[in-house]
Image (cartoon, rainbow, N blue to C red):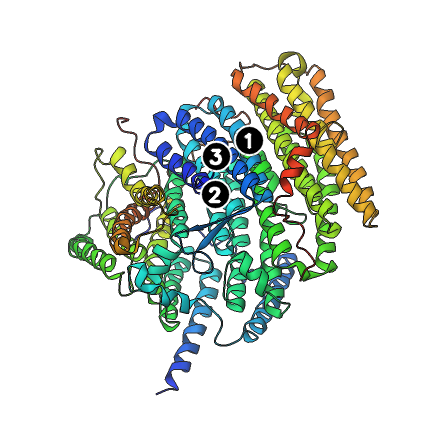
Amino acid sequence: MAREPGGEKIVNPNPMMSNGNNCQRLFRLLLGLLLAVLAAGLGYVLSSLPSPAPGLSKPVAEHLEASGVSNPVTAVLLNYRAYDTLLELGVLLLAPLGVWSLGVAARHREPLVDPVLDMLARLLVPMLILVAGYLLWAGAHAPGGAFQAGSVLAAAGVLLLLSGWWPGPAFSGLPLRVSLTAGPGVFLVAGVALMFAGGRMLEYPPPFAGALILLIEAAATWSIGITLAALFAGGRPVAGPHR
Amino acid sequence: MSLLQPVFDIVLGLALLWLAWRAVASPDLFRGIVLFIAFGLVMALVWVRLDAPDIALAEAAIGGGLTGALLLATLARLESGGGAGTGRGKDRESEPNDE
Amino acid sequence: MLEFHWQAILILLPFAGAAGCFLWPQRAVPLGLFVASGIVICVIGAGWQLAELGTQRYAVGGWGAPLGIDLYTDGLSLLMLAVTALAGLGISIYSSGYFSHERARYFWPLWMFLWTALNALFLSADIFNLYVTLELLGLAAVALVALAGGADALSGAMRYLLVSLLGSLAYLLGVALLYHGFGSVDIAILAQRVEPSPVVWAAAGLMSAGLLLKTALFPLHFWLPPAHASAPAPVSALLSALVVKASFYILARLWLEIFPFAGPGPALLMGLLGAAAVLWGGVQALRQTRLKMLIAYSTVAQTGYLFLAFPLASVTGWTAALYMLLSHAAAKTAMFMAAGNILYFGGHDRIADLDRIVQRLPLTITAFALAGVSIMGLPPSGGFIAKWMLLEAAIRSGQWWWVGILIVGGLLSAAWAFKVIGYAFTRSEAPHDTRKIPVVMEWSALLMAMLAILLGLFAPWPLALMEIGSPFDREGSG
């Protein structure tokens, strides 16, 4: 990412080794001392913990079959503590909402014309999408899952935006908002449907747990990818015809 | 080769601390951001050493890649002299219900 | 109907509302008002369930603690939900007239997310889940502050964001220490397993520091006045009335359930900081020239009263603090709404230039005066009941020095309240252009102020509700 020619160089306003006045130096020294004491205290506390530290790995392993996946991390994220993940997906929807409320996406007037970037984008973007699909599928039994797949998808999106591609106006209205909402939306609908089907909120019946988790993860992957790429675009889409 | 593992861990830990210090202390923001990206990648290695490969994947993609890209994009906007979104910089006293 | 999943709906309804308002911005206002009314109905349902069946534990996902997350309803959490619902309904009605169409399309989803976070926070019985709700709450609040635009709001929002993240980080570190010390993140299970050890002291210190930063207790209050004063008026009302109280609620829960053996030292420290907050906030409020800054410093002062419950350490003390929280929520909402009306009307909020608001905005100034009565602690108002109970607790436990703080704090509040009302009668030097205010804005301010007064007239009913599940009776049991 090259700096635009002609702009002034921005200097770090608070480099740690400042030649500034003594008051600032004293403050920094005190702060450093406080943090060192804090670190020492934490080190002492951690060394006093019993080892192996008590945890919940046994209950997690016991219920793993009923959870529908064989990766314990995915089981915790998408089944035992699915409610936390629902709220986190809400945070992920909140972030572009906040960014959009502040300004309009600045589309580069003259996108960078660079043969290396061009070739790299052509090669990498399809591969990144494939890798994202693989990570999504593999999350059930190996390291992977919705967040990892979503972030790889977002990397593909960022690469596309860097090489000058911009989504058309047809996508920037309702379809974009639907894509952003798809992850939390599917999760929410699943939670409510399960509630009215006789269980508690987000209680997956064991025969369908695996399929439900995959469905929710797929929607979440798409949303996470679009969300992170939209954050990179840096503002709300240019005002088009309101739908 | 059981000596290699603690040595590797110590090297990773020291590298993290050094990268963090240099990223915060460097007077050039561009350099600081690049060091921050390197910090994210070393952090991903640390997660692998702590037996948490899922977090390592997420850290490498988000901490190393996306956050770095966002920071560099912000730096580019700052250096080009303001860009979009600073037109509303003036102080308003009246609550803007008329925008 | 009694067995219905009221708690789950309380969380899912505003979440769905947020997604809906985001997808269909043209319908944002009716959808938001619909969700607000729905939440009030659900709170009534949950209250009925609580009254009939006692405290409720709802195992999300069917797993139950320690593997899953529990939602716990007792008198304390229900009362917090109720005040959020009432204040939220008032603010929703006010905002329907306040924001222009362009701002409203971002305000409503953000506000619905904030409400989701508040409801989820008050119902949660799991310390990691509380962290997630704190994150959602903080981010939504920051985005709402920044909605005003302008350098003041943006820098206030940025400072708020950084402070909020620092507090959350300290809290999360405490959660990690507790989990690795005792093998669970559920509050009830931790309450049984916890015993004094370095891990617990470190966790208590870290979590308290993080939550104190978020509650803006003196001297960690520096971020509050800029953020609350430069936000749009309904957002300022939300922040002062509800958001800072949420972290206080978590602090109270943790200290009452997990750290009851902490002894008098830390409690006395919090009480002293609270007293300093009352004095400092009151004095700073008197020095302000802008109305919204004054009200923001008043929030700093009133938050100090809440921390007097820690050294008082009795059921009366905690009940008093909770009642103070309720009446302050109603009164502060009304005050910020009144300030918003004045700002909208005249284009500025300089106290010295209020220019006969009494004649031109009579409903607004009545709302301000009634809210001021509650904040000063004059009868009959919720604030009076709360201060009376605090006095009672202080004298009964022999710590009569807190009485002085209560009296001085009341005098300081009276000073700035009368100052503002006095200026409302005077004519200003240079008259300025005025705008007509939507009727909903004036009436919602007045209704919230009347709620603060009603809390004083009908005190026994909320007080009885607070006792269900006896959340305050567990301290000292070790």
Which quadrant of the view contains residue C255? bottom right
Alpha carbon separation for disc pair 3 and 2: 16 Å
Numbered disc 3: secondary structure: helix
Q: Which of the 4 image quarters holds residue A168? A: top left
Question: Is the C-beta separation of discs 1 and 2 under 8 Å?
Answer: no
* Residue A189: x %, y % from top left: 32, 41
Residue plotted at (49% across, 23% down): C98
Task: Tell which subunit mark 2 falls on.
Answer: C
Asked if residue C43 is positioned above or below residue C139 in the image, the reply reads: above
Residue A114 drawn at (x, y percent): 19, 51
CA separation in Å, label 1 and label 2: 16 Å
Q: Position of residue B86 (x, y in %)?
A: 43, 36
Separation of marks 3 and 1 at Cα, in angstroms: 12 Å
The C terminus of chain B, quarter of image: top left
In the image, residue B98 sits, relative to residue A135, either above or below, namely above
Residue position for label 1: C86
Residue identified by numbered label 2: C117
Residue A235 in the image, given as x and y percentages of width and height: 35, 39
- What residue is rendered at 57% in x and 19% in y? C442
- Quadrant, the N terminus of chain B: bottom left
Which mark sits nearer the N-terminus, 3 or 1? 3
The residue wearing badge 3 is: C42
